[in-house]
Image (cartoon, rainbow, N blue to C red):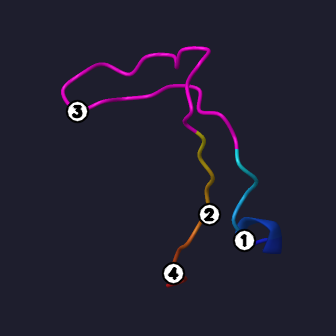
Amino acid sequence: MKAKYRAWSGWQKPDYIAKGGEQPSRPSSGSDYQIRYKLDYQDR
C-alpha cells in the first residue's frame, strides 16, 4: 500500500451525514462536522 494511505488524511467536510434510524442526507451549510480517514489492512 502506498505511504500516503497509511497516514491520516486532511480534514474534509462530509458528502452525507447519517443519524441513527434515518436515511443519509446532505449536511446543512452550517454543519460543523468534519471527517478524516486512514486505511488499515492486513496482508495475507
* Residue at mark 3 to residue at mark 4: CA–CA distance: 30 Å
Q: CA distance from mark 3 to mark 2?
A: 23 Å
Mark sitting on residue 42: 4
Q: Which residue corresponds to mark 2?
A: 38
- N-term-proximal mark, 3 vs 2: 3
Magenta stretch encompasses residue 30:
yes
Marks 4 and 2: in contact by CB < 8 Å? no
Left or right, 41 with reference to 10: left
Q: Judge from the rendering whether residue 27 lies leftward or rightward of residue 20; answer left or right.
A: right
Residue 43 vs residue 9, the one in the foreground: 9
Asked where in the image residue 23 lies, by quadrant, the reply is: top left
Q: With respect to residue 18, does 37 lie above or below?
A: below
Task: Tell me which residue sits at (25%, 21%) in the image.
Answer: 22
CA gap between label 1 and label 2 equals 6 Å
Identify which amino acid the numbered label 4 is placed on: Gln
Tell me which label, 1 or 2, sits earlier in the chain: 1
At label 1, which amino acid type do we have?
A: Ala
Residue 38: x %, y % from top left? 62, 63
Task: Kindly identify which residue carries mark 1.
Answer: 7
34 vs 21, left or right, is: right
Point 51% across, 16% down: residue: 26
Task: Report the amino acid beneath label 2.
Answer: Lys
Magenta span: 12-33
Marks 1/4: CA distance?
15 Å
Which mark lies nearer to you, 2 or 4?
Answer: 2
